[in-house]
Image (cartoon, rainbow, N blue to C red):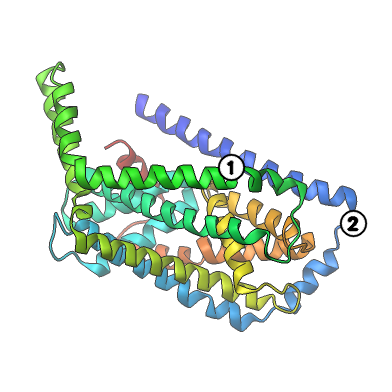
Amino acid sequence: MREETLIQRSTWKWLIAGGLALFALAWLVHAKLASSTFDWNLLTGTLHHLRWQWLALALLPIFASYYGRALRWAVFLRPLKAHPSIVGILGATMIGFTAITLFGRPGEFVRPYLIAKKEQVPIPSQLAAWVLERMFDLLMALAVFGFALTRIHTATIHVGPNLSWVLAMGGRIVGFLSGAVLVSLVAMRHFAEHLRMWLIRGLRFLPERHFLKLERLITTFVRGVESTRSGGALFLILLYSVVEWILIAGCFWCVARAYVDVLNLTFVDVLIFMGFVAFGSTVQIPGIGGGAQVVAALVLTELFGAKLEIATSFAIFIWVMSFVVVVPVGLVWALKEGLNWRKLRDLGREASHE
């Protein structure tokens, strides 16, 4: 009963976050509607002017990025398993991102849980790999966002009042977060064992049964981050991270080319747009999305002067390419392995309580 209560609280937390994101989007639409008339004909007309072949082409880099993620995760696994199955990791990746789209951020636990079961390694080690992946992705997102901030004032775009505060504080925030991530990665690479010993010594006051359980958990977690100790492995992780974000940028560029008749964005514009949207995607509403759409619409209207109708459709297609297109593939892969949506949800809950 207590476990069910904790799950319900977690669900309500993400529903509240999703509601706030939807409120922000509603506020943006309301603000635009208050100053002008929403042109539904323009919204539907935009779809007729799309170059659909570019949207089809966008599928190639976005699906390739999942393969890149699988290759990077295989490097995380090497200290525990020398030759992990790339196909198995790819399947878990597809299923995991499907769970994120369907259930929100709690679905993040599905992927490390499935990989741990498939490769027969401890679950805490794969949660550690997930932490590493998040850190490298954050580092890349910060790099793209930092580039966006440096190019804002040189590009021929308009900075609206709703984003002026972002530009004022953005440089400091990016610098602080980048430093924090780098320090954390250095600490994991060089001081993980010292931190493990320090934590174990500090927990010796606990009863033996609890102490031994926490000792195994900490030791397994530290083994999960050992991939960063090897120079060659660290190079591969960075390489795969760069390639992954290049592929994501390629997907965004293809969507932009599909809109070239109604919204002309240069490649630098796309990188600026991508830098802002990367942070909006941290809020993911189960089955809906959220922050990414809000930020996408806001950036397009405030920075690039796009009409709300065009910005809305563009934001929707970016969300579809970034999150939704993997769902059919992930569901088919899950069914092939004997999983359904209810089992996926239960896996996420089980993994979160390991």
Q: Residue at x 53, y 43 (%)?
A: 173
Does residue 240 appear to the left or right of 263 in the view shown? Answer: left
Pointer 2 with pointer 1, Cβ within 8 A:
no
Which residue, given by chain and number where applicable, does mark 1 sit on? Answer: 18
Q: Which mark is residue 35?
A: none
Count every numbered label the image shows and give the total.
2
- Identity of the amino acid at label 1? Gly
Left or right, residue 192 beside residue 161: left
The residues tagged by marks 2 and 1 sit, at their Cα atoms, a distance apart of 27 Å
The residue nearer to you, when weighing 180 against 81, is 180
Q: Secondary structure at mark 1?
A: helix
Q: Is residue 147 above or below residue 170?
A: below
Residue 221 in sight in this render: no
Q: Amino acid at mark 2?
A: Thr
**On the picture, is 197 further left or further right than 43?**
left
How dense is the environment of label 2, judged by Cα within 10 Å: few (below 14), some, or many (20 and up)? few
Q: Earlier in the sequence, mark 2 or mark 1?
A: 1
- Quarter of the N terminus within the rendering: top left
Task: Describe the element under mark 2 as helix, strand or loop.
Answer: loop
Task: Report which quarter residue 263 is drawn in.
Answer: bottom right
Q: Residue at x 47, y 42 (%)?
A: 176
Kindly identify which numbered label has been placed on residue 37. Answer: 2
